[in-house]
Each structure stands twice: as structure tokens, then as C-alpha cells.
Image (cartoon, helix red, strand yellow):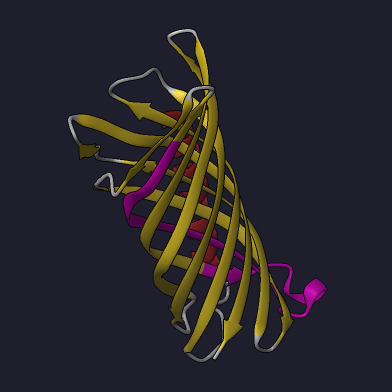
Amino acid sequence: MKKTVITLFTVFSSFLALAQESEEIKKESEFGLRLVAKLGYATLVQSDMVKIQGDVDAGDLLFYYRHPNGTSFSTGIGAMQFKANGVSAGESYFLNQTYLRIPLFVNYSLYIFEKQFDDKLQAYAGVGFYANTLLKEEIQTLGGTDKNKNQGWNGGYGFQLGIKFAVSNDFNFGLGFETQQDFSDMKKNDVKRRLEGISTVNFTLEFKF
């Protein structure tokens, strides 16, 4: 994860350097709705078990404000599902967790290949933070299913990179990469847990108001 963060920070710094040399986005301020679907993987670190790597399915519903200089702020609500298979004490199990997230991100966008794409293609990079709670957890074994609810809150940070294409004046489609990590533990009933190395491919739909 540290290598990933360093790599993204380097790319982000290069992106900002390029942005300083590029023409600013000549648009008026705008408000809009952003829908994001995410597919990827993560690692669960929990005090009573070994590290578990599993699949991540997530989605965000965000409201954003974009300044004419290309800087945008977005916040809203998100949901994430973590699924993994494992073995404990010689018994196989299936883990299914559902998280609720409240993100806050700052992005910067600039046009690329203006002449070729007629000012329709943008690259973006962003950083942000999120609050995170485990709403529901299910652990299935041959002997039955254990369920837990409301397992506490924690926080994390993330980085984003991607491109957006203007399908119309009021609609953008985006494709990007995001990496996130909890920076604190979620604590409940003497159990500590957090997610590390959350890496996803993001598919974005933006609707301008």
C-alpha cells in the first residue's frame, strides 16, 4: 500500500505541474450529481484473525460543485460490500460485510487533446477523506450463520485518477482508478478492524444541474 500511495502521489504531483502549464477550463461554475460504481479488492485486518483479502463492490451518490478553474468538491453517501472466503480452526467460512461511507473529495480537472476531442476529454486527479461504519456482517459456515450489526466507526483517506468524456453538455462519463485505506481502527466488543489497500476501478456518470 505504501508503494501505491507513493506512486499515486508522484503521478498527482506531475498532474498538478501539467495543470499549471495548461489552459484553465473555461467554464462557468456548476453544480451536479455524480454516480460512481466501483469494482476491486481490499484486505481486512482484524484483531482476532489473520489478514483476509477479498472482493469489493461499492457505489457512491455524490453532489459536487465545480469552480471555473477546474477544482471541484464532492460529498454525499456511499455503500461498500466486502466479500471473502477463508479458513479458521480448520473450518471454511464465507464473510460478507456491508459498509456505509460518507466521503469528502477535492478533484482537479483539465482538458487534454483539446483539438482532437473538441474540448470533450478531461483528465482528473483528487484526494479526500471518508467516515466509515460497518452496518452488517455475516459469517457463514457449515454450522450456520453468525450476524453482527453496527460495529462502530472509523476514518480513512483516498486518491483518485481518471478521465472524463463529455457525452453532452449536461452529461459526462468517466473511467478511473481509486485507492483508499482506513487510517484508524473500528472498535466494537474488544474487536479492532480496518480495511487496507482498497483498490478499485471506478465508472462515473455526472449529471449537471
Residue sitting at the far right? 116
Q: Residue at x 60, y 76 (%)?
A: 206
Residue at point 19%, 34% (across, down):
189
107 left or right, relative to 172: left
Q: What is the tally of numbered marks visible in this picture?
A: 0
Secondary structure, magenta segment, majority class: strand
Residue that protrudes farthest toward the top in the picture: 90
Q: Position of residue 194 (x, y in %)?
A: 33, 36
Q: Is residue 113 magenta?
A: yes
Q: Name the residue at 42% across, 21% down.
A: 51
- In percent of width and height, residue 18 lies at 55, 60
Quadrant of the image containing the C terminus? bottom right
Of residues 77 and 72, which is closer to you in this image?
Answer: 77
Q: Is residue 142 above or below residue 38?
A: above
Q: Position of residue 28 (x, y in %)?
A: 51, 92
Q: Residue furthest front?
A: 143
Residue 81 location, x and y as percent?
Answer: 50, 47
Is 27 on the left or on the right of 158, as rendered? right
Q: Where the N terminus falls, by quadrant?
A: top left
Is 187 magenta? The answer is: no
Residue 49 position (above or below residue 66) = above
* Nearer to us in this view, 182 or 159: 182
From the viewer's perspective, tell me whether residue 195 is left or right of residue 202.
left
Stretch in magenta? 109-138
